[in-house]
Image (tube, helix red, strand yellow):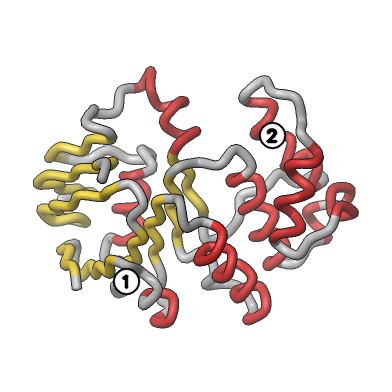
């Protein structure tokens, strides 16, 4: 197995409040990890740290044996994709949103690739012309998944991605994660006990302290 992330003695504090307390964790390629814990316990903070959105107050975090440097962040985020609880989409058409990952890579828009992925999320090609403002919350989350997945990142960081969805949309996304992403590395923060039990490795964070079940 290839070690992707290694966290040693990680602390994270804000205004003298310790959010993450001496985290030690190794994540291997292909791991399917679920993380539970009370609100405010540090789950999302850990996920954002893995996404390189925040940096540890102290300790050592490496990815593929190297610390993250600013000049590597762009490449890193092509491999490691963070999925928000509330999808962050432009207030324009679905097409505009799905073109964005192609634009930042200076790549030609691949409509067939996008359409194929839309269908996996039970959305058809007609959605490309729809306005984001006209979509339901579940549809927006599925569009966000398509946008993040179109270039097939190696690592998916999922931050309570189904918590605001109805049962139908939740089932669509759960099914995609468990059936279509088996070759990916997944770290999934969730309050849903059924989702938590899907993890091959199950972790909990309480008061910033990480434990593996």
Q: Is residue 173 rendered to the left or right of residue 27?
A: right
Q: What is the x, y in percent for residue 25?
A: 18, 52
Under tag 2, what secondary structure?
helix
Quarter of image, res 67:
top left
Q: Which numbered disc covers residue 204?
A: none
160 or 19: nearer the eye?
160
Q: Which residue is mark 2?
A: 100
6 or 29: nearer the eye?
29
Q: Farthest residue toward the front?
A: 1
Mark toward the start of the polypeptide (1 vs 2): 1
Q: For marks 1 and 2, give the CA distance.
A: 32 Å
Under tag 1, what secondary structure?
strand
10 Å crowding of disc 1: few (<14), some (14-19), many (20+): many
Q: Residue at x 64, y 79 (%)?
A: 166
Q: Is residue 145 rendered to the left or right of residue 57?
A: right
Q: Residue at x 45, y 51 (%)?
A: 183
Q: What is the x, y in percent for residue 110?
A: 76, 34
Q: Residue at x 33, y 62 (%)?
A: 33
The quadrant of the rendering that contains the C terminus is bottom left
Question: What count of labels does the image hold?
Answer: 2
Q: Which residue is mark 1?
A: 36
Q: Residue at x 39, y 51 (%)?
A: 185
Q: What is the x, y in percent for residue 103?
A: 69, 26
10 Å crowding of disc 2: few (<14), some (14-19), many (20+): some
């Amino acid at each position: 197995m290839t070690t992707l992330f290694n966290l040693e003695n990680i602390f994270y504090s804000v205004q003298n409040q310790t959010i993450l307390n001496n985290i030690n964790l190794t994540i291997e390629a292909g791991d399917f990890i679920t993380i539970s814990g009370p609100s405010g316990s540090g789950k999302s903070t850990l996920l954002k740290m893995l996404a390189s959105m925040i940096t540890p107050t102290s300790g050592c975090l490496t990815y593929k044996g190297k610390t993250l440097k600013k000049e590597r962040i762009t490449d890193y985020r092509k491999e490691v994709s963070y999925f928000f609880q509330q999808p962050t989409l432009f207030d324009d058409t679905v097409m505009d949103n799905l073109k964005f990952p192609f634009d930042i890579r200076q790549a030609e828009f691949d409509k067939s690739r996008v359409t194929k992925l839309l269908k996996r999320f039970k959305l058809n090609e007609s959605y490309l012309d729809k306005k984001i403002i006209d979509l339901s919350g579940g549809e927006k989350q599925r569009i966000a998944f398509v946008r993040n997945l179109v270039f097939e990142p190696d690592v998916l960081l999922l931050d309570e991605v189904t918590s605001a969805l109805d049962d139908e949309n939740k089932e669509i996304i759960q099914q995609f994660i468990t059936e279509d992403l088996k070759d990916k590395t997944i770290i999934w923060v969730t309050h849903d006990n059924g989702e938590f039990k899907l993890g091959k490795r199950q972790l909990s964070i309480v008061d910033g302290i990480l434990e593996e079940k």
